[in-house]
């Protein structure tokens, strides 16, 4: 990635902000929320929902999604018609708002219960949305160690094929 614009602070900040990696899920309706919940449940991650009225994802949100990647699953919910049910479900009145839904306890998952009905929602009640305050809040609810998903079968099969081919190459002798 090359920066080829003016060397002014404003231009450089815009470039950096636009190129920050983002691991934020977008929720647009109950179907997307269900997919988000399933992904979090499958990986055992706490769910964080950010309700925001801003049209673009803020650099702070992108930073937090990168900082807590694979330790929480972060989604952004905008106040649109499809998201009205999502906003009502969690009782959001003011924007911005952040809620955390902890992962189901080991006992709950062994019983086969869903995390949707019995998970306690934790609301961010802090004053102001600063980096330090949000990082401290999310740090309390994030997993200590990142969750690394297992490799897909296609990748594993491809690696096995490569390993089988390698011994054939080793059997060839070359003289110098």
Image: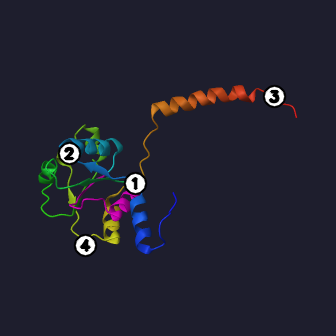
In this rendered view, identify the residue nearer to me: 164 or 101: 164
Are dots 3 and 2 in contact, CB under 8 Å?
Answer: no
Indicate the quadrant where residue 120 lies.
bottom left
Q: Position of residue 83 (x, y in %)?
A: 16, 50
Q: Is residue 144 above or below residue 129?
A: above
Is there a contact, CB below 8 Å, between mark 2 and mark 4? no
**Is residue 66 magenta-colored?**
yes
Camera-side residue of 61 and 43: 61
> Toward the viewer: 120 or 163?
163
Residue range in magenta is 46-70
Q: Earlier in the sequence, mark 3 or mark 2?
A: 2
> Residue tagged by mark 1?
69
1 and 3 marks in contact (CB < 8 Å): no
Left or right of 146, for residue 50: left
Q: What separation in Å lies between label 2 and label 1 (alpha carbons)?
A: 22 Å
Which residue is denoted by mark 4 in the rendering?
128
- Please tell me which of labels 4 and 3 falls first in the chain: 4
Question: Which residue bears the numbered disc 2?
Answer: 116
In three-dimensional space, the C-alpha distance between marks 2 and 4, rounded to whole angstroms, equals 28 Å
* Residue 93, horizontal then vertical, whole percent: 12, 61
Give the residue number, with chain letter if any, for mark 3: 173
| The furthest residue to the right | 176
Comparing labels 2 and 1, the label whose residue is closer to the camera? 1
Colour setting: rainbow
The answer to the question of whether label 4 and label 1 lie on touching residues, with beta carbons closer than 8 A, is: no
Badge 4: residue crowd in 10 Å (few <14, some 14–19, many ≥20): few
Q: Position of residue 48 (x, y in %)?
A: 28, 55
Would you identify the image quadrant in which residue 69 lies?
bottom left
Q: Quadrant of residue 55?
A: bottom left
């Amino acid at each position: 990635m090359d920066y080829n614009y003016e060397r002014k602070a404003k231009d450089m900040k815009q470039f950096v902000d636009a190129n920050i990696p983002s691991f934020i899920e977008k929720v647009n309706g109950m179907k997307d929320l269900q997919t988000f919940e399933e992904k979090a449940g499958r990986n055992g991650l706490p769910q964080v929902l950010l309700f925001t009225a801003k049209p673009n994802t803020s650099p702070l949100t992108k930073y937090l999604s990168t900082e807590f990647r694979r330790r929480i699953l972060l989604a952004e919910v905008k106040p649109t018609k499809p998201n009205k049910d999502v906003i009502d479900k969690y009782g959001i009145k003011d924007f911005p708002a952040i809620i955390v839904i902890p992962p189901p306890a080991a006992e709950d998952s062994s019983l086969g219960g869903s995390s949707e009905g019995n998970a306690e929602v934790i609301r961010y009640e802090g004053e102001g949305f600063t980096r330090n305050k949000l990082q401290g809040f999310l740090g309390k609810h994030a997993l200590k160690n990142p969750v690394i998903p297992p490799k897909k079968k296609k990748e594993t099969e491809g690696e096995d094929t490569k390993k089988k081919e390698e011994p054939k190459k080793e059997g060839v002798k070359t003289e110098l």
